[in-house]
Amino acid sequence: MPSELAAPAELIDVRPLGERLAVEATKKLAKTAFAELIRLVLPAGKEIKEHTAPGQLIVQCLEGRVEFTTMGSTKVLEAGQLLYLAPREPHALRAVLNSSLLLTIITTAAQSDLVST
């Protein structure tokens, strides 16, 4: 992934890629001590085997359609829908259509701060 990360208060464009979806790549958008933002680009048919995220995960479908398997069931995410998972919850996904997703990973350090306030 390219290392051009957004600076604080910099605008980040997460609108659908449309026709550019076929030629764009996954890109890390921003990273702080408490969160990471990634635009995940998946061509139709692409599968990501079961894995975990290091923190709480928020997955928002920006465009396309993705089958997201976790906690014993498969959900179909379409543009405008999102779901979230607890830290280290195993999950897998498969793009039904060319798709892009906005992933937000909230690190354990940030979660500890939220609990203690």
Image (cartoon, rainbow, N blue to C red):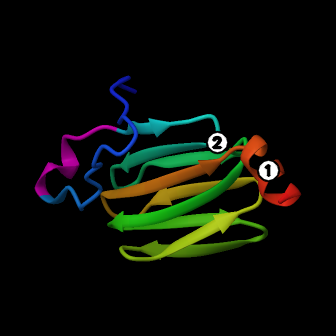
Q: Residue 104's spot in the image, x, y percent?
A: 54, 52
Q: Which residues are magenta?
A: 19-25
The secondary structure type at the circle numbered 1 is helix
The crowding category of the residue bearing disc 2, from other C-alpha atoms within 10 Å (few below 14, some 14 to 19, many at least 20), is some
Q: Quadrant of residue 16?
A: bottom left
Q: Nearer the viewer, mark 1 or mark 2?
A: 1
Q: Residue 21 in magenta?
A: yes
Question: Horizontal placement of 52 versus 23: left or right?
Answer: right
Note whether 71 is above or below 24 in the view shown: below
Residue matched to label 1: 113
Residue 5 lies in the magenta stretch: no
Name which residue type carries label 1: Asp
Q: Quadrant of residue 68?
A: bottom right
Q: Residue furthest left?
A: 19
Assess disc 1: are there few (<14), some (14-19) or many (≥20) residues with their C-alpha within 10 Å of its C-alpha.
few
x then y, percent, for residue 40: 42, 47
Q: Residue at x 78, y 68 (%)?
A: 71
Q: Nearer the viewer, residue 110 or 25?
A: 110
Q: Residue at x 72, y 47 (%)?
A: 110
Q: CA distance from mark 1 to mark 2?
A: 10 Å
Nearer the N terminus, badge 1 or badge 2? 2
Label 2, on which residue?
34
Q: Is residue 23 left or right of residue 54?
A: left
Q: Identity of the amino acid at label 2?
A: Phe
Circle 2: element type: loop
**What residue lies at 33% left-to-right and 63% top-to-bottom?**
97
Q: Quadrant of the C terminus?
A: bottom right
Placement of the N terminus among the 4 image quadrants: top left
Across and down, in percent, residue 62 comes to 35, 65
Q: Position of residue 88 (x, y in %)?
A: 78, 49
